[in-house]
Amino acid sequence: MVDSRTKRIYPHVIHIPPPSHSPAQRSHPHHPRRNLHTSYTFSQHRNTIAPGDLYNPHTTLLDILNWIITQYEKYCVPTRFSDAAVKRVWQLICAEDDNTDFLCVGPVNNAVHLLAVYYHEGRDSYRYKRHVDRLADFMWLGKEGMMMNGTNGVQLWDTAFTVSAVFEADLAGDKEFIPVLTKALEFLEDMQVSIPSLLVFQRTLPPPPGCQY
């Protein structure tokens, strides 16, 4: 099973660089996509997957759809659909940055956001500088080199699981635990997405306030 949070990572890659990026900048020797493999054709390896990772083989329908999308990206004019997709992804990036104070769901898409912001607004923008400030929350130099945490903490998960365990053990009504559970509830409520302008970016729309994911 693939972690559902990976769906929050993949779409943002389209901003590295965005379609409007100039050919001159694309050919820069330090451009990230140029440095991957200049002679590597990624479209020929959509089905190149290690056997241990092949949970759901690509269907013929998916291969056909991938081919159609590839032709559209190469030849279709006007580009209003792809332009709308890029605009929507940028809105998602900004919403996640604002909701998490630029920590994002995890360090992987945080790094992608950092690059997207660099190309979209430049290194002198507030968003870029704030992303750089937050890198120290989950990245550091160790004796093996650059190290990275999976997240900046699991406080919310631990609290939610602990409260569930207390209720399962029929201890919620015990006066001894009421003050602790009250503080836990306050913490859980503080962690919710309760800003109306951000609720529209949730995967589902439960009655507000709703959890980020």
Image: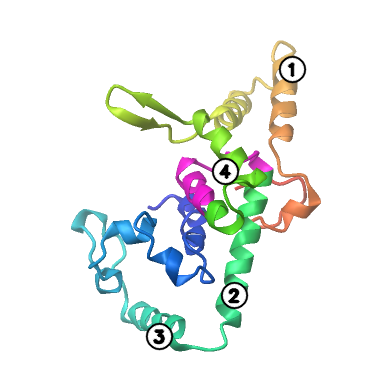
* Image quarter of residue 108: top left
Image spot of residue 86 (x, y percent): 58, 68
Three-letter amino acid code at disc 2?
A: Asp
Kindly report the distance in space between the C-alpha atoms of the residues bearing marks 1 and 3. 61 Å
Three-letter amino acid code at disc 1?
A: Ile
SS for dot 4: loop
Kindly indicate whether the residue at mark 3 contacts the one at mark 4 (C-beta within 8 angstroms): no
Near mark 3 (Cα within 10 A), the count class, few <14, some 14-19 or many ≥20, is few
**Mark 1 vs mark 3: in front:** 3
The residue under label 4 is 104
The residue under label 2 is 83
For marks 4 and 3, the one nearer the N-term is 3
SS for dot 3: helix
In the image, 163 versus 80, the foreground residue is: 80
Kindly report the distance in space between the C-alpha atoms of the residues bearing marks 4 and 3. 33 Å
**In the picture shown, does residue 138 fall above or below 208?**
above
The reply to whether residue 187 is visible in this rendering is: yes
Is 11 magenta? The answer is: no
The residue under label 3 is 71
The residue under label 1 is 178
Magenta stretch, overall SS: helix
* Label at residue 106: none
Image spot of residue 81 (x, y percent): 58, 80
Q: Which residues are magenta?
A: 99-115
**In the picture shown, does residue 34 fall above or below 100?**
below
Q: Name the residue furthest left.
A: 51
**Mark 1 vs mark 2: in front:** 2
Three-letter amino acid code at disc 3?
A: Gln
Three-letter amino acid code at disc 4?
A: Cys
